Image (tube, grey):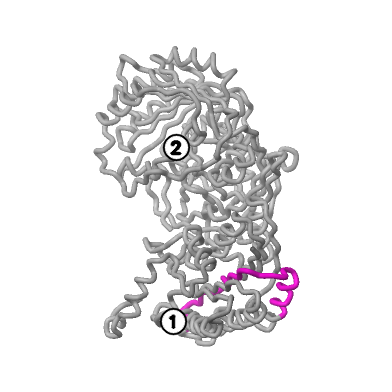
Amino acid sequence: MNVVVFGATSAIAQAASHFWAARGDRLLLVARNADNLNAVANDLRARYDVDIATHQADLADVAGVPDLVHSVFESMSQVDRVLIAYGTLPDQEACEIIPADAWPHLTTNFVSPVILVGELSRRMASHGGCIGVITSVAGERGRRSNYVYGSAKAGLMTFLQGMRHRLHGTKLHICDIRPGFIATPMTQHLKQGLLFAKPAKVAPRLVQAMDRGKSVVYLPGFWRWIMWVIRAMPTYIMHRTKL
Amino acid sequence: MNWESWGRYPRLSQTAKALYWQSEAPHLLAEGTYLPVGLGRSYGDVCLSDSGTVMTTKFMNRVIAFDHRSGHIRAEAGIALSDLLKVTLPHGWFLPVTPGTKYVTLGGAVANDVHGKNHHTAGTFGRHVTELVLERSDGRRIVASATNDEPWFRATIGGLGLTGLIVEVSLRLKRVQGPFVSQELIRFRSLDDFSKLTESSDRDWEYTVAWVDAARRSRGLGRGIFIRGNHASKQGKPDIPGPRINIPVQGPEWLLNPWSIRCFNNLYYHRPLKSGLQHFDPFFYPLDVLGHWNRLYGRRGFVQYQCAIDDLDLVGRILAYCAKHKRYSFLSVLKKFGNQPAAGTLSFPMPGYTLTLDLPADPNTLRVLDQLDQWVLDAGGRIYPAKDARMSRDTFKRCFPQWRDMQPFMDPRISSAFWQRVSGEKP
């Protein structure tokens, strides 16, 4: 199978790439930092003896996305799986003081993947496959601790939902991957409690959900129930929490 | 992230930051001094920072290149030996030297210049390292090997992580036929018997070590089980199991008391011995099946005392002295080192015997160990820094009179609680 990973140096993407490489899939990794990208690719090559291609690109550069997709499909004629794993976590408090600080984050977390998924779906519709997009449980309800991040993810989730509706009946699946707390560089500053999961532990579930063409998958699975409670929580209780 | 040493003594408040990439500069992530660490399997305070900031490399764990034919591997320093084996063993390559746990990082193995059951044939880990890449806190990168920047190479092997952040390690692996070891277990009744066994085994057996019953007062003093093994040619799946049982919380302090430790040692000595083919994992890493076994000692934590002395009578005197003061070691190991020259400036192994004792960290233990230090020093021996949490400044300087040779190589932004304690000055 041919797999393309956008944001290949993210911790979850690395773990998933290990999984794909171990089963012999061909990988094309796209990331911004060339040194880190090479480190990830070399690691996969040395461990699994597989074909790994790399492409350095900055996904925050929204205007460059269509060309990027074009060159990806030039180097890989057929794509079966795409994982979109890049994202940034804005400093919520800083965005409250200077609202414009949210802009680059909204671009990277919402505008860029919207264009990317759109471009990909045009090219993948005929052959089929699965596009997996990492969103977040933060997008399911606005909460004071991270609603700037959450709103970008919520927009993206709605976009994916609509696209899934449009593609219903075709061979192309859109998988909305919603991680809870995963121990990654992005969450390093948070106190790591019992709810934190390791990327390597959740990667098999991610890969499996994409193989099966699932619509929504939580990582780990128990977040489905946690989010059910959070969504169902009456506002007057929610507002008394610091969540 | 919380951070503690494996012995959980001393307890110092530590903040752990994680390094994920070689492109990250650790000196920009922290203010003041810090200490690069791996998985925190050192027993005492060589893996604790006096400033309170440690930088763990355990996520900087990528393989850079692996040549299946020559058995050379180059990897980032944070890779665990358990992970490295997953990569190399399916191709018939094993670690040239391995410590008693596979949950240490490559960088940690270099920084402590660890040894294993094959010290008499292979020397220490550092002897098999072909190149190191060191990142200094001023941003300078030093590529050191036996032929290039050799003084840096020698200072970094066994250098306790103080010469800079070790970012890459190149290692020459050892060819094996399969994942099995043919082992023989032999009960011995005294240290004299041990001596005969080790003299007669060290030529034909690649791996030799002895477990000693350190809970005997007089009768049966120095009895134990001699373990010897060679890699076997039998093929098999190179599985690398994780811990089978996890100790989830720290045990109560009374759990490991003189009585229960004596009982355990007695049972262990009399257990039925089965020689023959053994999977490499339980042979090399018997304790790895118990995740977090260090929690068994409870809140107080424990100290491991490992000394090297060229005098078997002294080993007997140490065991007798500990027994007299009811300081029974839960798990005690005795091994005869070989004559290989040391790979690093501060490398611990030297010709002679090495004895390892696990003791609960309490005032009585510390008093007993101070006495042992005196005997070890008088015999011209050494204490192993990777295990130590309590030796005095004077003891360290007499064990390692070459410690001053390290000064020119110390990174000014890196410091450990151990070094602060034994050198008496900020490096």
Query: Do we see residue B9 in this rendering?
Result: no
Per the image, label 1 sits on a secondary structure element best described as helix
Image location of residue A10, percent across then percent down:
57, 66
Query: Do we see residue B284 in this rendering?
Result: yes
Q: Distance between the residues labelled 2 and 1?
A: 49 Å
In the picture shown, does residue A137 fall above or below B249? Answer: below
Image quarter for residue A222? bottom left
Viewer-closest of A8 and B157: A8
Q: What residue type is labelled 1?
A: Tyr
In the picture shown, does residue A14 fall above or below B79? Answer: below
Viewer-closest of A152 and A114: A114
The question of residue A70 being in magenta is answered with: yes
Provide the residue designation for mark 1: A147
Provide the residue designation for mark 2: B388
Image quarter for residue A231? bottom left
Q: What residue type is labelled 2?
A: Asp
